[in-house]
Image (cartoon, rainbow, N blue to C red):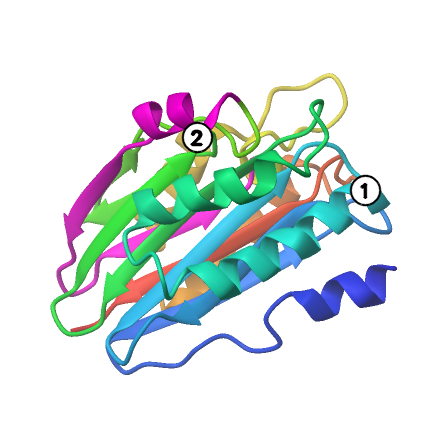
Amino acid sequence: AQDMQRKLLPQEVPSFKELEIEALSTPAFEVGGDYYDFTMIDEHHLGVLVGDVSGKGVSAAFYMAEMKGIFQSLARIYRSPKEFLFQAHTTLASTIDKRSFISLIYAVIDLRSGVAQVARAGHCPLLYVSDSIGTYIKPQGLGLGMGSSEFFKQTVAEERLQLKQGDILVLYTDGVTEAHPKDEDEFGFERLQHGVERSRRSSAVGIRDAIIEAVALHMKHESPEDDLTLVVLKWNK
């Protein structure tokens, strides 16, 4: 099951001269519910998605597989992140268990202009580092599968960022920020932000590895209790 789930994730990250991309996903158990993916919406627009299915195990992995099908089929039709999340919610609402939901953060990046549009469905906020200062971008939105379609549409929002050379975007799951050794505090948003700020001059892979190393040190190399997924984007244009 773990091998099948691994094959649902991208086998390689896209490569662009304008945009460095690195990613990592490690399940805490044999199978998990974390998910990341990429798609070229058209010749100039890249879609980047990170998600987390509530719960763990095989049922979470099944919902992850369903989410992949929805993303790959709808992202090219509904080009706005906000509209895509609404359509994904509508598609999932009839099949997802009422005790489950999927959190997502979705960014569409124009590879010509550096404009990034971001929408969020109950997921961890996007970390945006520009001019050495980190900011958490938190457009509102419920998790997929929560509430009626009408209510979901009213709550989901979208934000626009203009990337400059050296700007960094970090999309992740709560396995990063909530990582903690037994009876100690969580890794948290502040440590994540400061770690990326300190490593901002590194490549995307260097920033990714710095985050993973910082989490591992905070965990005192104990086994994690939750899946951990991380996507790092660095704008070079």
Q: Is residue 200 visible?
A: no
Q: Between 54 and 85, which is closer to the camera in this rendering? A: 85
At a point 72% along the width and 70% down the height, the residue shown is 7
Image quadrant holding the C terminus, namely bottom left
Residue 159: x %, y % from top left: 21, 40
Q: Nearer the viewer, residue 183 or 231?
A: 231
Write down the region rendered in magenta: 147-174
Q: Relative to 36, say whether 10 is above or below.
A: below
Residue 216 — which label? none
**Amino acid type indicated by mark 1:** Ser
Q: Position of residue 103 (x, y in %)?
A: 53, 36
Along the line of sight, which residue is nearer the eye, 142 or 209? 142
> Callout 1: few (<14), some (14-19), or many (20+) C-alpha neighbours within 10 Å?
some
Check if residue 152 falls in the magenta segment.
Answer: yes
Residue 78 in sight from this viewpoint: yes
Q: Which residue is mark 2?
A: 189
Give residue 141's position: percent from left, percent from top.
38, 28
Q: Which residue is under mark 1?
A: 59
Say whether residue 143 is magenta.
no
